[in-house]
Image: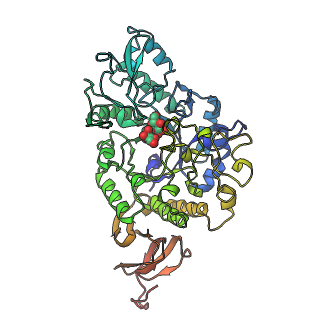
Amino acid sequence: MTDPFEWWKHGVIYQIYPRSFYDSNGDGVGDIPGIIEKLDYLSYLGVDAIWLSPINASPMYDCGYDISDYYAIDPVFGSSSDFDRLVDTAHSRGIRIIMDLVLNHTSHLHRWFLSSRSSRSNPMRNWYLWRDGEAGRPPNNWRSAFGGSAWKWDEMTCQYYLHSFLEEQPDLNWRDEGLRAAVFRMIRHWLDRGVDGFRLDVVNWLIKDRRFRNNQSLPGIPFFQKHRYDRNRPETHDILRELRLILDEYDGRMAVGEVFTLPPGDPVLSASYLGSGHDELHLAFDFSLMYRPWSARRFYRALRRWTNAVPEDGWPCHVLSNHDQTRSMSRYGREGDREKRALVAATLLMTIRGTPFLYYGEEIGMQGWRIPRSDMRDPLGKRYWPLFAGRDPARTPMQWSPGDNAGFSAGRPWLPIGVDYPRVNVETERADRYSILNYYRSLIAVRRASPALRIGSWEPVLKGYHGTIGYYRRLDGETVFVALNFTDKSRRVHVHDRGQWIVLLSSHRSTNTHFTSLEFTLSPYEATILKKIGPLPRHAPADRKI
Ligand code: ISL
């Protein structure tokens, strides 16, 4: 039986970057009424929940990851009542809402920071991290993730404040009881308004070393440092335990944390934020797959490590793309093989044990396109141009139709539309039986109908050698077998398991095709999901091959 309170285990979670989803009022920026209009589409796709990147009031120095009022909705996205309408309408369709919670920092224009900054004796002074410098230099060697020192000198009170990202994003001081209480009050506010869960931004950075010790940096390369004292401090777990107690007071609410690490990722660290599996985060992102090149062996190993790291009572989740990374189509793809690889990756994402997170546009095969400097909006891209294209390519507007502006907006879109929109768009793909969109939709439907795929065991048998991954998913009497060919060559599958199988879904075969063994040839880039329908009947020749 599916426990409705555990929807976050069973369901598919779809990430919406609100600026880019659908613009209902022609100002070029996606908005909440636009999301409401597209709930039909999300029901058609079959997702169970949506995670919204930040929609709170913000001066948008970091596209909303710099919040100036946690209680308000930014007018560019709509009103407070639009948000309530979104929650109600989504709920009436069985779609849950996950909000982004940015708790490591606020905007420099948040009233907490304005107070904190106003004087050394302000009651909110300690809500942020203020320090004296050392002989005219910053208090220590910590670096901002976006480059440069993480400390900013403030003339007003002649001290430095810490900012792990932009200087417009001062870090909060989670050791302060008053700050903690204020944040937890705000969290209850959104839970009371019916929000089903939260995605916690850089959750592993919340607490900093009490003594502000220097990080070790490599000689001669100060920007390459081990973040021992400004990230992953042990006290972070206390905060998560407190948060979990609050969430547990409500039915069916969840938290997923962004445990940010650089490549190659750190599954053991990510899993540590799940605690015992019951007392910290419900889910934690591990970016290993996102950081792996296209290789069955590398993917298999990353999955194995991640699966082994998750505590027995915990639950994994998987993600191939998000608003900070190059889209999977562009990352894994190779000219000519792009779409084929996308189907293999999609099949893996939707059939592996753990909750899949699907980034908007992946289901139609959107790619990242280089954005001209004059159109760039991401502060990182502007800072590092031309060395780094920034994060805008992964944030271009959703491609709805072959019409003007890909049907995203009646005005000028905030970012240019991907050049392939006449072909890669929802309307065209809905009508094409063989589109990526229809494949995703079928995958989600197959997953929904199969308890083994949703919550069954994961038993790998083809472990990435020769470019294939194959695994069983089992629950009670149900057995599913998934075979994935990562290569552009045919590959033979030999698994000794006699029985009758039917194809639930395949990138290359018709649904319901009958197999009498798991000995068959996978076409180049074939992804096939089989379901066992029983033993071989007595009269069938046991060695008949397909
Ligand atoms: O985006 C990155 C590099 O391309 C990452 O270093 C990113 O900063 C990291 O994943 C943390 O991301 C989160 O917090 C940031 C925000 O800019 C990102 O959009 C968000 O996902 C600061 O809030």
The percent position of residue 107, horizontal first and vertical second, equals 49, 25
Quadrant housing residue 151? top left
Q: Is residue 127 above or below residue 30?
A: above
Q: Nearer the viewer, residue 198 or 417?
A: 417
* Rendered position, 506 above or below 364: below
Residue 463 visible in image = no
Numbered circles on residues, count? 0
The residue nearer to you, when weighing 51 against 362, is: 362
Residue drawn at 56 percent across, 33 percent down: 55
Q: Position of residue 76 (x, y in %)?
A: 64, 31
Q: Quarter containing ligand 1?
A: top left
Judge left or right: residue 227 versus residue 531.
left
Pick the front one: 36 or 201: 201
Q: Position of residue 108 (x, y in %)?
A: 49, 22
- Coloring scheme used: rainbow
Q: Is residue 38 above or below residue 186?
A: below
Please say if 104 is above or below 505. above
Which quarter shows the N terminus? bottom left
240 sits to left or right of 195: left
Q: Is residue 234 left or right of residue 14?
A: left
In x, y percent, where is residue 217? Answer: 27, 36
* Residue 490 in sight from this viewpoint: yes
- Residue 157, quarter of picture: top left
Residue at the far front: name it.
220
- Residue at left offset 54%, top offset 76%: 509
